[in-house]
Image (cartoon, coloured by chain):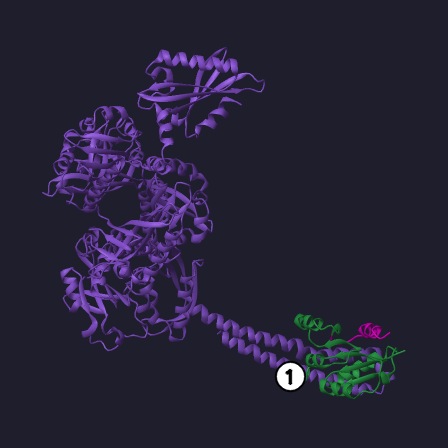
Amino acid sequence: MSKSKVLIIDDDPVVLTLHKLLLKKQNRIDEKDIMCFTSGKETLQYFNNKTEEDTFYLLLLDINMPFFDGWNLIEMLKYDNLKIIIVTSSIEQKDKLKAYSYKRVIDFYSKPLTHGCCKVILDHIA
Amino acid sequence: MTLNELTSLIENSSSAKAILTYYKGNFVYSSTNLKYDEFFKDFSTEKSLFHLQDFVENKTEFKKKLDVSLENIKTKNETDSFEFIYKHHEFTCKNSPVFNAKGQLEFVVQTLISADNHEMLSRTVPYKNLLANIPGVIYRYSVTDNWQLEFLSHNVASLTGYSHTDFLKNPKKFLRCVHPDDFYKLASISRNIQTLEHFHIQYRIYKANRSIIWVEEIGSITANAEGKKIIDGVIFDVTEKIQHKLQLEKLNSRYTLAQRATNDAIWDYDIASQKITWGEGFNKLFGYLYSTKTYSSENLREQTHIHPDDEEAVLNDLQNALADKKISQWDQEYRYIKADGSIAYVKGRCYIARDKDLRAVRVVGSLQDITSEKNRATQKELILEINKNFDVSTDLKTGLEKVLHTIKSFFDIEYAEIWLTSIDNNHLNLITHTHAKNIKLKKTSIKRKEGLLGKVWQKNTKEYFSTTNFTNTQLLDFKKLNGVAIPISISNKVIGELLLFTKIEQIKLKQFSQLLKGINEEVAIIIERKKKEEELNTFFNISNDLLCIAGLDGYFKKINPAFTKNLGYSEEEILSIPFEELVHPEDVKLLHNEMASLAKGIPIFQNEFRYIHKNGNIIWLSWTASSEPEEGLIYAIGKNITATKKAEFNLRDLNKKLKEAQNIAKLGYWKRQLSNEVSFWSDEVYKIYEQDPDKFTPSFEHLIKTFHPEEQYLLKEKFSEILIENEYKDFEHRIITPKGKTKWVWQRIKLETDKNGNPTTLRGIIQDITVAKEKDIQIKSSHERFELAMKATNELIWDWDTETDVVTRSKGYSTIFGYKKTRTTSVQGFWFKKIHHLDRQRVKHDLFVTLANKNNNKWESEYRFIKANGEIAHVQDSGYIIRNANGKAVRVVGAVKDITASKRMVREITKQNEILKEIAWIQSHKVRAPLAKILSLTEILTHNDYKDSNLTEKELYSFIAESAYELDQVIKEIVLKTETIQKHSL
């Protein structure tokens, strides 16, 4: 059986901590399978260096990040076995429409994430 | 033995014999032989009536003796004889019986034997033989006082018809028989009897039957012992000889006269004596003076004067004819050298006389000068050959080349040249010659009067010359040639010259140049004909019209290239098919009709037929043709009138269209001769006036009633006051139709005058312009409305006539933009100059592109415009394009709106929008980020979710504080932005 990992990408460390906490609280995923990245660049480096094969990745991606935003990361990620869920503070419809224009984006959430949201999110790796 | 057999037996007997047939106890004379007949010939010429008993002196006694003799034969069956006296001579009649096979008496052969014969037989054999062989009468006279006839042979009876006894009884009887004209001959002998020893005379005597015969008497006179003169002589009948002689003399006389009279030369060759007698004709015909002199055959060859080339053949042929015993006539044609050295063609004919052994002993012949005939034949042959040289396909030069070679083949010519006069008749040009090709001739063109040829040209007479003095070094072998330059003329006009060079003597050259005279005429005719033919052929070939000779058999015989050009078929194709196959099927019947006329010799003139071009197109040809029914030929000229026909059809179509157009345009034509009260109206005029052509007469009286009362003055005025002579003048007026309807018409009228300036005709066109006029009125009203609208609006309304480039602008031009002049004559010259330079090219380009697009009727643009006070105004300009029937923009009506204020407002609103957008973004992202964090932290704290983690409550509260501070900063930023918007709004 292939593994699943959840990658949380947000420039705000507090947000990373909180989102990881909420996911962990669901008890459906090991902490070690929740990874946090503060920038798109850092995330890309991870994918470039990763060794595990047959791992499914679920990315919780913030859009508004300095220098290398979420849109850039979506464009540049070449790894196939992954899905993306946008988690942003934006409530603008245009951001939502843009997010859904990418095939790999499967969901869109405006912050803050709730337990209910986390439950649905983790259903994607069940 | 039959009677025939018996007759043949006695026929050749030397004795006088007759056959008597015994029939029923009687004897009948059946046949006699020649001797028997001769015995009695003096007494009867009718042998068939001859009966011996009729002529015997004592018929009764003879009959009695014959009856007794025949009775004796009947009884004794033996030969029986009796004697009788006939003409004072004693005869024995010997009758011998002939029996048939049954032993019955059938015939009696009767033989008459003279008693004299008996006497002669008793004499000596030599004398008997002498008497028997001498054809004449032998006599002896002893000359005394009375001439005594001592002896006279019995054949005197056959000579004279008188009996021997007659002469014995009367010795001078013979003298009485002599023809009086010849008596002197005998008298002469008588007179000279004493001196003469011999005599030989011929004279005529009368026979007993009074016929005259010629006799020849040869005698000798001797004297006997007593001194008496004895004449011994013999008299021969020489009638035949004399007659022959006389006839010969007569013939000779005739021959001499005939020789003189004939045009032939007669010769007589006596082979035995080897002598030839030449007749006078040789002098007359050939100029030899030997007349009838006689020449020996030793120099025969020299005397024949047969042309050396023919001599051997002719003489051999004659020798062969003489040797051939069957040939009695010999004919030959050959050349004969005349005394002057010229050559004559002769036809020789001779008759060969042969002896009994059929050896030729004499030849009499004639020479007939057939030079003229031969020349005519040669001329004819030459002309025929020359004509052959000019067949249809031969051009003049080639034909003349052949002519020269033909002449060369006929005559002994070394070289020949043909010169022809130039078209302008100023030069004589060498056309062709027979010199070697590498010979470069010194002159090939000469002027009139120049040199020998010029002289001949001038005089139109031939010139003989010798090449001895020729200086042309190129022609070395010209030396010592004789030549002749012969003018080739027709109707005394020299059209060229024939130049001949020969080695033969001048006399012969003259002879055949004479021969060429007729030929030159022929050549002249041919040259003229060929020149004309070539000219004609040139026209024939270059003619754009179709020229042809066709047969009544339905085929073209000769066509010019225009056929191929016009019909697309090759010449071979056209000539090989009946011409009706080229004709449009619908016109074939017409063609047959016209062919029938042509077959009767009736010409056709400009008959039009459709032909089918090879590519299938229809070609219209107009034919003019005449025919020669006897020759079965048609001579025709065809003109391609396809273009004319098309034009005609187009014209018809145009006329139709014109009529339709007149109908549509409601345009009519009228004319009035001023001498006539009534005008001519076209159909459309009646329609315009709505008058019935059958009922309405367009007279002045009727016409004035149709005019609107306010415009009737037009008809009442004098023409000269309202019209200018010979110029068109336009009028618009109203007419009232019979139904009372008012119509507007436009008329263009011209008053025409004669050469003296007197008005003669009124001519005009009339058009119903009611609809246009009504529209005009509507337009006028519309225009007025437009003018009012222009005054009322705050926009600048403009009306641009693109053809005149005149722009009419509304008041807004001055009120909005500050310019005073509302009408200017140039868009480009003014308006474009006032457009901001950064916009000018774009606006200009857009406008003209739109105008050029026939499908676009609206133009819009925004640009900056320099106002009169120098301010820049933003304007929105739009125009509606009016196009003519061809789609060309003729007018543009538009409006210019000053949008400077609204433009500025939009800019500000846009700016505000930007700020608002930014605020919204801040709200969306920056405000919600800390807020979301606070909410999330609050949620965690509320549910104690942090307890299973390494986070402390304190940490969480510090996170909340940080997020709240962050939120506060964001709100301050928004407030600041909002203030900025407020500032812009103000």
Q: Residue at left 26%, top 54%?
A: B276
- The answer to whether residue B356 is visible is yes
Please state the horizontal and vertical placement of residue A84, each as a whole percent of the image.
76, 76
Residue found farthest to the front: B226
Q: What color does chain B have in the rendering?
A: purple
Closer to us: B782 or B870 = B782
Q: Residue at left 14%, top 65%?
A: B455
User: Dot 1: few (<14), some (14–19), or many (≥20) neighbours within 10 Å?
Assistant: few
- The residue identified by callout 1 is B969
- The answer to whether residue B532 is visible is no
Give left or right: position of B125 versus A117: left
Relative to B591, residue B964 above or below: below
Closer to us: B161 or A32 = B161
Residue found farthest to the left: B756
- Secondary structure at badge 1 equals helix
Q: Is residue A122 magenta?
A: yes
Chain identifier of the green chain: A
Please state the horizontal and vertical placement of residue B715, each as a whole percent of the image.
18, 36
Residue A45 falls in image quadrant: bottom right
Inspect the image, locate mark 1, and give the three-letter code of the amino acid beneath it.
Gln
Q: Is residue B26 magenta?
A: no
Please state the horizontal and vertical placement of residue A65, each as a whole percent of the image.
69, 83
Disc 1: host chain: B
Relative to B444, residue A49 above or below: below
Magenta region: A110-126
Closer to us: B132 or B610 = B132
Closer to us: B311 or B772 = B311
